[in-house]
Image (cartoon, rainbow, N blue to C red):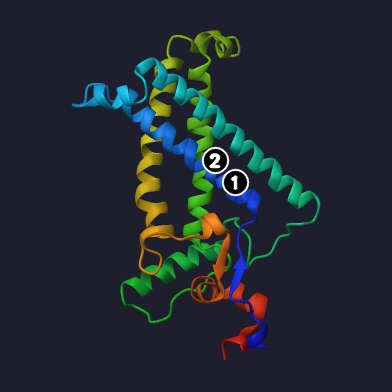
Amino acid sequence: MSNQIPKEIERFNVTFRIQHVLMLVTFLLLSFTGWALKYPEVEHAKWWVDIWGGPDMAGKIHRVAGVGMLLDFFWHVIYLGYLIGTGKMGFSLTTTIIPLPQDVIDVAKNFAYFLGLTKEKPKFGRFSYIHKFDYWAVFWGMFIIGASGFILAFPVMMSKFLPGFTLNWVWPLLRILHSDEALLAIVFILFWHFFNEHLKWGKFPMSWTWITGKISTEEMKHEHPLEYEMRFGKESDK
């Protein structure tokens, strides 16, 4: 049976990979231009803004990238709906990205393993609690950063839909929400996503899954043992 096990398994199809690349590109553009616009008083800020063609052009790039990220997000949600509606994606406790009570148990088990309180590591399915937190953070960010950014990008149009009693204070609030949540997103991506997906031992300097869409069966056996057992059975470990 072991001879029938392929060396690689497709983890993400080409549509998911394109969506991820678009998210990456728009995120980087938003981070670079947004940082320059958020901290204009920082030393060398003028040099950084000038790279993007000055504050006016940096603002335009920021808005275009923001709209592009929102469109990419909506495409992703619609595509998920299509997969579920056509039966191409089903629900399984082993493969779901939806947070489950087991994830809380896995967090406790993982901390116990790291602290040397147990020698047994938690066994993850297709997505660990790390992946789930990483994934759903995007949804949270889209509601906070995306909504506030869209309103700030089109203030005249959006002011028609805002209640009159909010117009005196809503704009400073939206700027704080947008700016501080964006800063949190940058820190989160740098220290959580990049480390867990690219920089940690065994993946450094980069995991190629986001480009190829594939994962080796050896990595699956190590990182996603429950999914491996679901696909190939426990006897395949022998």
Residue 37 visible somewhere in the drawing: yes
Residue 70 against residue 215 in the figure, above or below:
above
> Which residue is at a point 44% across and 58% down the rendered structure image?
197
Q: Residue furthest left?
A: 43
Label 1 environment density (alpha carbons within 10 Å; few <14, some 14–19, many ≥20): some
Q: Residue furthest right?
A: 86
In the shown orientation, is residue 95 left or right of residue 169?
Answer: right
> Which residue is at a point 43% across and 28% down the rendered structure image?
178
Of 206 and 145, nearer the camera is 206
From the image, tell me which residue sits under label 2.
22
Count of picture labels: 2
Secondary structure beneath dot 1 equals: helix
Q: Position of residue 92 (x, y in %)?
A: 68, 64
> Which residue is at a point 59% across and 71% down the rendered structure image?
8
Label 2 environment density (alpha carbons within 10 Å; few <14, some 14–19, many ≥20): some
Q: Position of residue 205 (x, y in %)?
A: 36, 60
Of 63 and 164, nearer the camera is 63
> Which residue is at a point 63% across and 77% down the rendered structure image?
6
- Could you say which disc has been placed on residue 18 in the image? 1
Residue 211 against residue 21 in the figure, above or below:
below
Q: Position of residue 36 (x, y in %)?
A: 32, 26
- Could you say which disc has been placed on residue 86 in the image? none
Mark 2 touches mark 1? (CB < 8 Å): yes
Could you tell me which quadrant the N terminus lies in?
bottom right
Residue 173 visible somewhere in the drawing: no
- In three-dimensional space, the C-alpha distance between marks 2 and 1, rounded to whole angstroms, equals 6 Å
Q: Position of residue 79 (x, y in %)?
A: 70, 45
Q: Amino acid at mark 1?
A: Ile
Q: Amino acid at mark 2?
A: Leu
Residue 103 against residue 183 in the figure, above or below:
below
Secondary structure beneath dot 2 equals: helix
Could you tell me which quadrant the C terminus lies in?
bottom right
